Amino acid sequence: MQQSQIDAIKASPAYRRLVASRRRFSFALTALMILTYYGFILFVALSPQTLSRPLYAGAATSTGVLVGVAIILVAVGLTGWYVRRANQTLDPLMSTLLKQARQGD
Amino acid sequence: MKSLRILCGATLASAATFARANGISGPVPDHVELNPVAIGMFVLFVLVTLAITRWASRRTRTTRDFYSAGGGITGFQNGLAIAGDYMSAASFLGLSGMVFVFGFDGLIYSIGFLVGWPFVMFLLAEPLRNLGKFTFVDVVAYRFAQAPIRLLTASTSLVVVIFYLVVQMVGAGKLIQLLFGLDYWMAEVVVGALMVVYVFFGGMTATTWVQIIKAVLLLCGATFMAVSALAQFGFSPEAMFRHAVDVHPDHLSIMAPGKLLKDPLNAFSLGIALMFGTAGFPHILMRFFTVPSAKEARKSVFVATGFIGYFYLLTFIIGFSAIALLGQHPEFFKAGADGSFNLTHDLIGGSNMVAVKLAQAIGGNMFYGFIAAVTFATILAVVAGLTLSGATTVSHDLYACWLANGRADDRKEMRISRISTVILSLVAIGLGILFENINVAFLVGLVAAVAASANFPVLVSSIFWRGMTTRGAVMGGALGLVSSVLLTLFSKSVWVDVLHQAHAPVFLDNPALVSVPLAFFGIWAFSMLDRSARGRKEQEAFAMQEFYGHTGLLPTEAVNH
């Protein structure tokens, strides 16, 4: 790709919007993961009795086990969400942009 | 807080959990007999991997083949290989052992090890693939002065690789002694020799397939174990937990947090080291250059995260079912004079042997041999990846891109990488033997802290912050490196446990809580203070870097510094 085409893309508002939304998405998911993990650690450190509560009356399984498994699923789920959005939305937008720029001259 | 360091060992390497003088070790067997089934299965694994190496060596002609398997690995294969690289012998044996002793707390640690992966996905995977060629140093060096950046990041990478290798070697020696009845030094030589053969002849292709095979074997073995164990409770986790609570010496408290995490500050610090350390390990980051596109890079992180998460769930089930089931096998324990034993203290071989003992209880000697062989294979896969990463750092980052100014002769570069492979393995064997009787737990924490405080901040800032300059990168990275090394040196793990002083001057067991922010601050401050013309040009180059990072259109010659 020609440098002039690249410069044109970089200057276009559509490209800036796409880059910004991609970055926002990355940072938002990062923040979500940090909140989930450290939220859990805070519970462990400050309110362990919440996690020790039995899942239902008379159960040996504690709430904490369920929460722990849920966090593992959240971690996998968030990475899956990222892949899905990147494949279905962000990548096609970028390739459309590039195609338009190539046809532009 | 000895337990926190043990936990660290559990993911990152074997040694911490296998090191002497740790909190959850148990009686050592007086004499281990050679186990023919285990050795037979292991020999089979070696033969298969050697055949693959032979095949891979025919496809390893250029440095590109050697470093990145020619970029021809698919996202799914790479995801499995990453999982194979990350699920160390220690995370299998150490985590299931920790669940066995502490119950629920083991799960807290598994989660800590897993959450690094989403960060790799959200922040690093795509820009790495799009901007780098063979190492993460390529990405950092994209818009900055080559010499200082390469020198700094290559040295932090080598520190990480060599110490991590030592940790693995020491752990491997002790484990193999316990499982196979081989002498310590013999185990070192076998591991060292095999890793040279894989890497020297087969480069990234052989290393990748060794990791894939190992991941599949480990996942299948652990699945079989967890399912068979659960079957004994009618597939009811509640029944398994109920039984475990009844027989464990700590009873209901094993279902609740509390025994390991008494000190939140240390827990936070360790959490930071684990999370960001994963995203700063050179041998892990290197795997993203083996796939053809950013899309495949994303897929590989998703596959890896899924398998690693699944694997941690299995270790949790294995640990709990072991509590419930191992007590029925008094022959696994060192009983007192009255024939009674304590479930968590008297297991022969210590709590690291929980998973293998459970294998024996479930599937007899055959399955025990299988799991022991898989554990050995696991060590090989991890050390091969480390060695390859170290050799690439020397031949690509230091020789080709810096000393030869990007005009290296391919054959000469290949020769240098192969010589580095041999030297690295000799160093690993030598240090492994030298460190046999030293408590290497501190190295585990150190390796994670250096990766988290020197590599990760520099890498992530170079990708996301326009304002960073060479000066900021070098000063920030150096601050992270120096502070993490110094703080570790004065922490309990070295000052008290290795140097036998009474009190450690630094109360943090892992320095990451201080050293990671310090590195980011250094990058910010020295970049802001940098008013040089070069610094301004580097900031202006960010727009192009961002473009290439998002589009993957970077011409390959341009990366060929």
Image (cartoon, coloured by chain):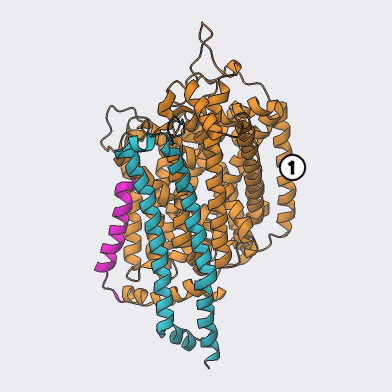
Chain colours: A cyan, B orange
Pick the residue in front: B546 or B541: B546
Magenta stretch: dominant SS? helix
Residue found at the very far top of the displayed protein: B338
Residue B382 placement, left or right of B48:
left
Q: Which residues are magenta?
A: B509-533
Residue type marked 1: Leu
In the displayed structure, B534 sits above or below A62; it is below
Instruction: Residue B520: say if magenta.
Output: yes
Instruction: Characterize the local packing of mark 1: few (<14), some (14-19) or many (20 or more) Cα atoms within 10 angstroms.
Output: few
Rendered residue at 54%/30% (across/down):
B240
Pick the residue in front: B273 or B264: B264
Residue found at the very far front of the displayed protein: A57
Pick the residue in front: A37 or B495: A37
In the displayed structure, A34 sits above or below B23; it is below
Residue B58 placement, left or right of B330:
right
In the displayed structure, B303 sits above or below B192; it is below
Answer yes or no: is residue B540 visible: yes
Residue B64 percent across, percent down from the top left: 62, 64
Rendered residue at 33%/34% (across/down):
A49
Residue B551 percent across, percent down from the top left: 51, 75
Answer yes or no: is residue B170 visible: no
For the N terminus of chain B, give its image quadrant: top left
Pick the residue in front: B133 or A95: A95
Q: Secondary structure at mark 1?
A: helix
User: Chain letter of disc 1?
Assistant: B
Residue B470 percent across, percent down from the top left: 35, 67
Residue B123 percent across, percent down from the top left: 44, 62
- Would you identify the image quadrant in which residue B72 lies? bottom right
Instruction: Residue B139: say if magenta.
Output: no
Residue, disc 1: B47
Rendered residue at 47%/25% (across/down):
B245
